[in-house]
Image (cartoon, grey):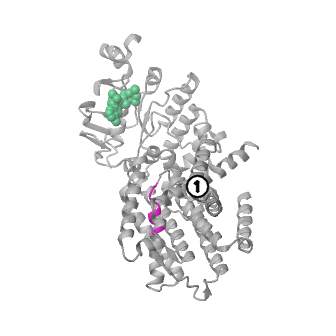
């Protein structure tokens, strides 16, 4: 009940926010919030540290960009195509990585993502260092001109809310129960008759798909797909966002993404510009040492304790 | 159906080698249907390894395993459990971040066939609550249905583990030291519980507490350095001087 009211308030806030805050900044924030929420599905709820999620985020960015710019697909279809391609890539990488545990899983996902990155670096369709530029935003539903930032914002917000709802449902579903059981005690889940690899693979593919959805949407917002989005830095950044906000909480990753993106934005324009990574690193260290559960995790623990 | 066969589980020459070290050595084990069968032996004798082989958490180096007359030597862990052989673990195996009811429900929900349905609401599992509560009631945990398991006392976790195993309606239950680390009272409780749930089922259990073995078990197999030392009912086995030497040591 309480969380329902919370969500309604958040949606109301997001509806009026673009009248106060620069919409492009908000859209960037929503894309990363979605990316982190998707990532949380595999790390927070699946217990698997993927270090290659940039491949899905950045990869879908290129695919969506290409589909819109070269094939002239409608915007929605282009984004969907990007997300599904990321999901497919998730199947491939997942099948190779899912049987590994802990650090080996992280290493394989990183290695695969680096391979994808090198393919992007040397391919023509990505525009190499220059990126894939001039991606048309197009029209939503065929008639709403997305060149208008406000229209674009509500389009992105709709994608975010729908995707967030599906992710939240996934966590609170029969599948989500099995997934938390596997995260809690994999051997026990096996002994109860679950083929744990298949559940982990589905979680990985869902996570990859939504990461792709976020990447594709971001390309449309900025009309650009660039190498930064598939660089391993991006894989690290999404880990940071998720941990900072609260691993395994529903809204934590979004909050973490909002904090990081806001900081990056304000610090970059100030005198600390060159020190952004250091400041973020410091925040990360403080967070890991002092608030291990992340902002939202600590908040929940505090509320639980004070009752 | 081979229901008439006297043995529910048989192994032939079951062997497991770890880099030259033989942890389980040509074990021929026969477990009679509807019995409580104990597997005992000193520390490191290979009891847990036998369980791991039977449930394919480890792959046998050699040998054959059959369940209800069917060869399951190559069957995967999850499939073995679905066939009706469900194990517990030496270290209590629960899902600590879930409530007791949710723990049991995880075992019940696979039958609904919706375990991959990520779009279905959690409330679709509520139909299982009644059965889950029955099972919790059976192990005396009805009051703790909504408690998060991680914070529960050790004895309760073990009881919950039994409830979760029972939820699978196993034909054959493998219990690895169900009373380990428990105080006297909890040991008695769990002993009663095992007695109660053994109706209509077969139980193979590893147990160090010989009091428990003598009250519960119909047949005792003694393992020493991976091999079967002897087998028989409790009185025969406990009178065997080799067993006294290997297993009971100074207690004899
Ligand atoms: N995965 C493994 N790799 C190497 N050696 C192993 C492995 N698992 C077990 N062993 C060895 O096999 C032997 C038998 O171990 P096991 O755990 O089966 O003994 P146990 O009879 O269950 O003992 P306890 O009563 O202490 O539980 C031990 O010497 C152990 O060190
Ligand atoms: Mg053991």
Q: Which residue is mark 1?
A: A275
Quarter of the figure with residue B30: top left
Q: Is residue A135 above or below residue B88?
A: below
Q: Is residue A81 visible?
A: no
Residue B143 relative to residue B157: left or right: right
Quarter of the figure with residue A261: bottom right
For ligand 1, the image quadrant comes to top left
Quarter of the figure with residue B140: top right
In front: B117, or A121? A121
Quadrant in which the C terminus of chain A is drawn: top right
What residue span does the magenta drawing correspond to? A50-58
Whether residue A51 is in magenta: the answer is yes
Residue A59: image x %, image y %?
A: 44, 69
Residue A125: image x %, image y %?
A: 39, 77
Q: Secondary structure beneath disc 1?
A: helix
Residue B7: image x %, image y %?
A: 32, 38
């Amino acid at each position: 009940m309480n969380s329902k009211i919370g969500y309604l308030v958040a949606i109301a806030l997001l509806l009026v926010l673009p009248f106060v805050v620069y919409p492009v900044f908000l859209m960037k924030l929503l894309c990363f919030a979605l990316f982190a929420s998707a990532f949380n599905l595999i790390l927070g709820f699946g217990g698997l540290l993927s270090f290659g999620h940039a491949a899905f985020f950045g990869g879908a960015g290129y695919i969506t960009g290409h589909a819109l710019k070269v094939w002239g697909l409608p915007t929605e279809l282009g984004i969907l195509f990007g997300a599904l391609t990321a999901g497919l890539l998730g199947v491939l990488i997942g099948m190779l990585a899912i049987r590994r545990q802990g650090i080996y899983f992280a290493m394989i996902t990183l290695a695969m993502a680096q391979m994808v990155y090198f393919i992007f670096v040397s391919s023509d369709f990505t525009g190499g260092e220059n990126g894939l530029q001039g991606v048309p935003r197009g029209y939503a539903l065929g008639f709403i001109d997305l060149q208008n930032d406000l229209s674009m914002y509500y389009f992105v917000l709709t994608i975010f809310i729908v995707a967030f709802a599906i992710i939240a449902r996934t966590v609170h579903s029969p599948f989500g129960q099995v997934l938390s059981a596997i995260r809690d005690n994999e051997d026990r889940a096996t002994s109860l008759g679950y083929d744990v690899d298949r559940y982990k693979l589905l979680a990985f593919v869902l996570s990859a798909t939504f990461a792709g959805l976020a990447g594709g949407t971001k390309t449309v917002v900025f009309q650009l797909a660039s190498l930064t989005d598939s660089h391993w830095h991006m894989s690290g950044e999404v880990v940071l966002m998720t941990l900072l906000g609260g691993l395994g909480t529903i809204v934590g990753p979004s909050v973490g993404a909002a904090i990081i993106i806001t900081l990056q934005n304000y610090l970059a324009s100030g005198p600390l510009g060159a020190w952004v990574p250091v400041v973020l690193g410091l925040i990360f260290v403080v967070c890991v040492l002092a608030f291990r559960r992340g902002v939202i995790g600590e908040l929940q623990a505090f509320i639980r304790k004070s009752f | 159906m081979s229901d008439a066969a006297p043995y529910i589980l048989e192994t032939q020459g079951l062997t497991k080698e770890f880099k030259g070290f033989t942890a389980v050595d040509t074990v021929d084990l026969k477990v009679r249907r509807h019995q409580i069968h104990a597997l005992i032996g000193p520390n490191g004798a290979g009891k847990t390894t036998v369980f791991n082989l039977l449930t394919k958490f480890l792959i046998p180096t050699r040998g054959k395993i059959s369940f209800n007359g069917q060869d399951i030597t190559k069957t995967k862990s999850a499939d073995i459990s679905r066939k009706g052989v469900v194990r517990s673990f030496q270290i209590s195996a629960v899902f600590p971040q879930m409530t007791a009811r949710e723990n049991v429900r995880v075992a019940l929900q696979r039958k609904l066939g919706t375990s991959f349905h990520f779009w279905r609401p959690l409330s679709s599992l509520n139909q299982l609550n009644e059965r889950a509560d029955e099972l919790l009631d059976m192990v005396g945990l009805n009051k703790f249905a909504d408690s998060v398991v991680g914070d529960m006392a050790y004895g309760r976790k073990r009881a919950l583990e039994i409830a979760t195993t029972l939820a699978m309606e196993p034909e054959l239950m493998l219990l690895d030291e169900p009373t380990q680390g428990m105080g006297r009272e909890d040991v008695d409780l769990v002993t009663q519980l095992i007695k109660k749930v053994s109706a209509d089922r077969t139980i193979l259990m590893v147990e160090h507490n010989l009091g428990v073995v003598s009250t519960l078990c119909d047949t005792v197999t003694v393992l020493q350095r991976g091999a079967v030392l002897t087998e028989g009912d409790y009185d025969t086995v406990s009178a065997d001087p080799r067993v006294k030497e290997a297993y009971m040591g100074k207690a004899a």
